Image: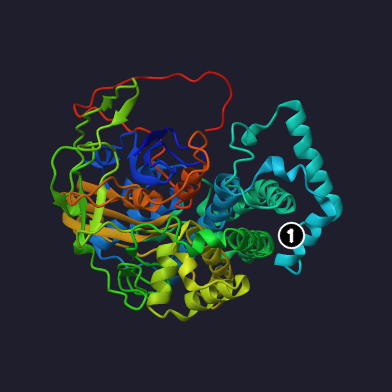
Amino acid sequence: MTKKHIIVDPVTRIEGHLRIEAVLDENNVITEAYSAGTMFRGIETILKGRDPRDCGLLTMRICGVCTGTHYQRSIEAVEHAFEITIPKNARLVRNLIQGALYMHDHPVHFYNLHGLDWVDITSALKADPAKAAAEALKWCDTPYNASVGHYRKVAQRLTKFVKQGRLGPFANAYWENKSYKLSPEQNLVAASHYLDCLDVQRDIAKMHAIFGGKSPHPQSIVVGGVTCVQDIINPARVAEFKSILNKTLDFVKHAYIPDVLMAGTVYADEALAGIGKGVGNFLSYGDFNLDDLPFYESKKLFPAGVVYDFDISKCYDLDQLKITEDVTHAWYKGSEQLHPFKGKTEPEYTGYRKGEDGFAYLKTEGKYSWSKTPLYEDRVMEVGPLARMVIGVAKGDPLITEYVQGFLKRGNLPVKVLFSTVGRTAARAIETVMMGEEMLKWCDELAANVASGDQETWTKFDFDRVSRDAEGFGMAEAPRGGLGHWVKIKNGQVEHYQIVVPSTWNSAPRSHKGDRGPYEEALIGVKLSDPKQPLEILRTVHSFDPCIACAIHLVDTKGKTLAEYKVSGACDV
């Protein structure tokens, strides 16, 4: 039997640094796969000795994408430790800030990161604009920015890029790969919305900044509540937020959802075959508090829970004590499975092996990734939009079930298609429209609460009293899945801090039992049309929306200055 060993490094159109190695059989079907995060994240070390109230401002620098959600989880971990319950206005504003992140993240992921795994730009150049307009009407009665004239201009614009050799984001792709299945007209419709999304996302970022202060890296959340008092009590600011949200929902409903339906229908055979289905174990921490109880007791828009082995007839309650981190195959010292309160971040880099062909390969029998392997009851788990939708359906949540069934009905698709690369992509779109419509209600709830005379935004607490010796956790959902921050505080300072991010769950290397991580398992059985153009690997991995930490964080444990830099010229700080 002839086998091929291929390397995709770096995986592009993601946040961070990711390497995939795959072994193919003689039919170019993946029989083994390995996922490696190729950079070190040591921010937990940086936080030791800090004032716990400052941790949120530092932890959100882990990433330039999910900044606000790290910020909020860190703040919630400290609030849990201090036994603080925030006011209603603060809860609603935090929901809106977090929701704005979802509304920005999901469409941008589909069009500007994941879209080119489905859409062949060169095929779009061959499209008939009149047929493209007719195609758009098949998937939506009022398609977004759809007309013969508009599609003709888009085609001319793309053709101009090609002729001038200025392809920009469309350069170095696997155009005309046999794995592309959309017609020229379908490709033109989706390519048009790719360009539209570049404009739409600018307004969504403004929405994020209205209550967050700025985007990325919002700054209005503090331990005990929020600081954006003037924006909360000003009806014009709430109205501005709602106006942008309505425009965003217009794009989501009349471009994003129809395009996912279109692609899902064309690739339905792969979805029905379960291509990219993954590990089959799903976990959600739950998120978006719907009442004013402490966050760990509050009813959630996304319910918490655990589903095993693709079985949506059963959903188990989540117990954070059952979460551990395994480093058997990660570049850290040890091989224990430790709860995050006891977790360690002690690097032990063992490098690569040199193959007979001269290339460097992962030492897959040992340690081969900077990503740890989070486990729940000693099992690898998938987190993210698909997990949230699966758990919602398994728990019988009426709202999630309604949205999932409505989408499947529009595409005439069975529930089983969700367990696939296509289904993972569809789940993200389903929750986006649900999120947007719920946010409109939160805007009205916030306005009505303030109008009733309630302007409270912060719960007062005595830091010197509550901060002596405490521990807490903040656990909720980021756009990519379950995000947890665990903190131990001693004498008013951080003694221990551990973060388990969504892409650590999903990008995990093998567990101590040899179980593949979600990326790895999802790639098994995927067939490549051309091993020199591993489009199918990118499509499946991108369906998780990888967000590997975007920078290497270094600290000298003796407190010495590592380097100083002077930046000349004008810049925005």
Q: Say which residue label 1 marks.
A: 144
Residue at the far right: name it.
149
Q: Secondary structure at mark 1?
A: loop
Picture quadrant where residue 386 is located: bottom left
Q: Position of residue 83 (x, y in %)?
A: 25, 65
Picture quadrant where residue 147 is located: bottom right
Towards the viewer: 50 or 361:
361
Q: Amino acid at mark 1?
A: Tyr
Picture quadrant where residue 382 is located: bottom left
Q: Position of residue 40 (x, y in %)?
A: 30, 34
Question: Is residue 288 shown to the viewer in this render?
Answer: no
Residue at the image position 29 percent from the left and 38 percent from the top: 370
Q: Position of residue 388 (x, y in %)?
A: 42, 66
Q: Position of residue 525 (x, y in %)?
A: 40, 51
Residue at the image position 44 percent from the left and 52 percent from the top: 544
Question: Is residue 187 shown to the viewer in this render?
Answer: yes
Would you say 566 lies left or right of 120 here?
left
Residue at the far front: name it.
1
Residue at the image position 68 percent from the left and 42 percent from the top: 121
Towards the viewer: 347 or 95:
347
- Please say if 472 is above or below 187: below
Q: How is the image coloured?
A: rainbow
